[in-house]
Amino acid sequence: MKIMKNYKIALLLVLLNASIINAQSYLGFLSDNYSGVNSVVINPANIVDSRLKTDINLLGVSSFATTDYLKLDMTNILNGYDFDYDNEKKYPTENNNAFLNIDVLGPSFMFNIDKNNSIAIFSRARAFINVDELNGELIDEVESFDSNLDKDVNINEGDFNINAHAWSEFGFTYARVILNEKENFLKAGLTLKHLRGAGQAFVNGKSLVVDYDADGTILPAGFGTTGSLTSSGKITYGRFEDYSKDGYEYEMPESSGFGTDLGIIYEWRPGNKSNSKKEINDRFNRKDKNKYKLKLGLSITDIGSIDYRDGLEETFNVANSNLSEQDLRDANDIDDILNNLYSLNETKNSYRAILPTALHLNADWSFNNKFYLNLRSDLSLISKSKIKSSRIHSTLSLTPRYESKWLSFYLPLSVTEYMEGEVLRLGAGLRAGPLYIGSGSIVSVLNSKNTQQIDVYAGLKIPVYHEKPDKDEDGVKNKLDKCPKVPGPVENNGCPWEDLDGDTLFDNTDDCPQIAGSVENNGCPWGDKDGDSLLDNIDKCPKMEGPIENGGCPWEDSDGDGVLDKDDICVNEVGKLSNNGCPVNELSLEVKETFYAKTILFNIGKSSIEEEFNAVLIEIANVIKEYPIAKFLIEGHTDSTGKSSVNQKISESRAISVKNFLVKNNVDPNRLSVIGYGESKPVSIDDSVEGRTENRRVEINLIN
């Protein structure tokens, strides 16, 4: 039974490949802000305001496979046991499903035209196999057909859809910023793709029922019985027109089409509340930094189709009763069965293959500049029953990630279609400079005995990162910084200050930048401003000439006695030069005689000093000041004219008048005492005018 064997092999290969091929589309990696041109496949708006100035993808391969018919024991396979399809766990139902997606991103590049506009050009090859709502019991029966020829089989297949499609893409993407105002940032992108089909085959069944009667047909000449097949329903079968011809060699079919991707991304940037140009420039216009707290993305991808002009689509009514098993065995292939044993209702010489249109929702939360949490939903917009259509495998994932310029790490946790008994799967991914590799299920697969889904991706690229606007972080932008790799002050154009004279003082604070000097003298050598041969740094009086022994200061005369402090034994006491600056306590005999010869005379009954005695009193005052320790008694006298009591008062007044005069001329009053003797101490006989005149006097005498 050649045709049944062929059918069995083909059907099993679809399910087997969908179960064991490493497979998916960059789960985890596409959430990375450094995924560059790769991110265009999920949302074309991603490439503008990218963390990469330019990105060149050399080659990236992603594949994804799942089925609810077969579960693999990966622990046995990883431990070295040979894979045995017959011994793996199978879960046939009335509606089994399988899916395979292989996505190859070829040479591609993106770059930012300016801060608001970016473009990308990419090449891509893709392959999908979709098996939807196929009765798993039919698969089991086909597998055991040769060994169970004596068993009756009745299967109500109903509706099913199988589609396999491969094609290439050449795409151009343009994205731009459409809003950047305070906290709100919005960007959008559009991709236009030229498509070239590499081949498609599909089988669609409607209301299919199959009954096999093991001995339903009597063989001629009495040679016993053989099986018979009774069926009803419709089957639509599409493929290359020349595919089933003998000696067929593959060639690219006559096929082409166009596709479109649309995307929009909103970013909430709560720190950008100020209209300050400086704040915006410093914090929110940095191309090398992420600026959002929350990023929301919405995109629709793969809007379009491919026209297969040399394709063949045929619809058959498969209603037939008691079809002999021998007739099936004699058929060469499925074309023979359908065309010779069933009735052809409709034929089309070309058809249109629909792309796997999908809706993508993305939310990315930034905890800080390194740690993020991404929520992504990929939803197919193509119905399972839509004929000639590929559809993605709907996925919901939650991915925490660590992200930096040269290294990112992802731990995607996801749930997908057709998952029974294995609700969540855990993967891991890594981007290290030009290399990216990962899987959305690797952690789960390595620890599972019931693996329904496997995926993996890997690739190599050349990322060109944005430079920091101020690489050395000295406050001077790179384009204005004459030393962009070494921090320096703004006033020196971003370069560090030099020390041309090598005196350890930078030129910006060195008053003599070309002559080595002392730090204490602002970088200048010490001078001798007052010319006293003592340098200013050790000269206590750098602006006044003075002897070295007095630290460069002139000698002082602290007590003002005319004797310099260096020679004055009594620095703080007025003294005599003859006594080394110290005061002399006793008046010399000559001074005493001169002093006692000074007598102040007064008019009758008067205590006021006559002008003629002013000079005498000034001379006395100067003498008193020369002897600062000595104390003096000022004695007042009268003649005998008048009452004694009156004369007593007049004598006292005369003594006080003299004291006041001396005090007025800077004599310390504490050194002067006054006393009045009245008429009691005459110096002449009081009976003549001359005598009385001499008795009206004041005398000053040394007390000690």
Image: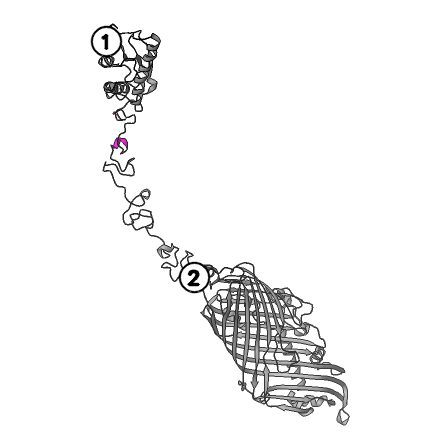
Label 2 secondary element: loop
| For residue 150, above or below residue 674 | below
Give the labeled residue for mark 2: 469
Give the labeled residue for mark 1: 689
Q: Is residue 579 visible?
A: no
Q: Amino acid at mark 1?
A: Val
| For residue 242, above or below residue 40 | below
Separation of residues labelled 2 and 1 (CA atoms): 114 Å
Closer-to-camera residue (157/627): 627
Locate residue 382: give its quadrant: bottom right
Residue located 26% across and 26% down the image? 564
Closer-to-camera residue (362/99): 362
Q: Is residue 394 left or right of residue 657?
A: right
CB under 8 Å between discs 2 and 1: no
| For residue 698, above or below residue 299 | above
Give percent across and percent down for residue 192: 52, 78
Give percent across and percent down for residue 597: 23, 13
Specify start and end residues of the magenta stretch as a single range: 543-567
Give percent across and percent down for residue 66: 63, 72
